[in-house]
Image: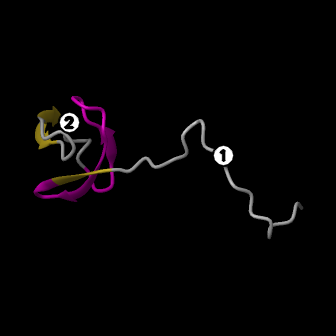
């Protein structure tokens, strides 16, 4: 197990060595933030912005696209 620190909540927790590979994503076991490994040695994590649409947001249609 490898100790890591969540950049979102600052809490430390352990993950398996198979989890700590470049660009791998996993959730913080404390705050559930989605994290990505951006450096392996030393291990550096970044919070991933899941910036998708909320359920109540509408998708704007681009009028330049024609139906095929």
Residue at coordinates 80% horizontally, 65% vertically from top-left?
63
Quadrant containing the N terminus is: top left
Residue 7 placed where, x, y %? Answer: 18, 47
Q: Residues within 10 Å of mark 1 (few under 14, many from 20)?
A: few
| Secondary-structure class at tag 1 | loop
Give the mark, 2 or 1, whose residue is nearer the N terminus.
2
Specify the farthest residue to the right: 68
* Whether residue 66 is situated above or below residue 12 in the rendered picture: below
Q: Nearer the viewer, residue 20 or 59?
A: 59
Q: Which numbered dot is residue 58? A: 1
Residue 8 placed where, x, y %? Answer: 22, 44
Q: Which residues are magenta?
A: 21-43
Horizontal arrangement in the rendering, residue 34 relative to residue 56 (left or right): left
Q: Which numbered dot is residue 67? A: none
Horizontal arrangement in the rendering, residue 33 relative to residue 62 (left or right): left
Residue 20 placed where, x, y %? Answer: 23, 47
Residue 61 placed where, x, y %? Answer: 74, 57
* Whether residue 13 is situated above or below residue 51 in the rendered picture: above
Q: How is the image coloured?
A: secondary structure
- Residue pointed to by mark 2: 16
* Whether residue 9 is situated above or below residue 21 in the rendered picture: above
Horizontal arrangement in the rendering, residue 10 relative to residue 45 (left or right): left
Residue at coordinates 14% horizontally, 33% vertically from top-left?
14
Residue at coordinates 13% horizontally, 41% vertically from top-left?
10
Residue at coordinates 18% horizontally, 42% vertically from top-left?
6
Q: Nearer the viewer, residue 45 or 64?
A: 64
| Number of marks in the rendered image | 2
Specify the farthest residue to the bottom: 64
């Amino acid at each position: 197990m490898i100790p890591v620190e969540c950049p979102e909540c600052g809490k430390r927790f352990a993950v398996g060595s198979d989890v700590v590979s470049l660009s791998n994503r996993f959730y913080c076991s404390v705050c559930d933030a989605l994290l990505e490994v951006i450096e392996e040695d030393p291990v550096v994590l970044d919070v991933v912005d899941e910036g998708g649409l909320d359920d109540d947001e509408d998708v704007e249609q681009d009028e330049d696209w024609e139906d095929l």
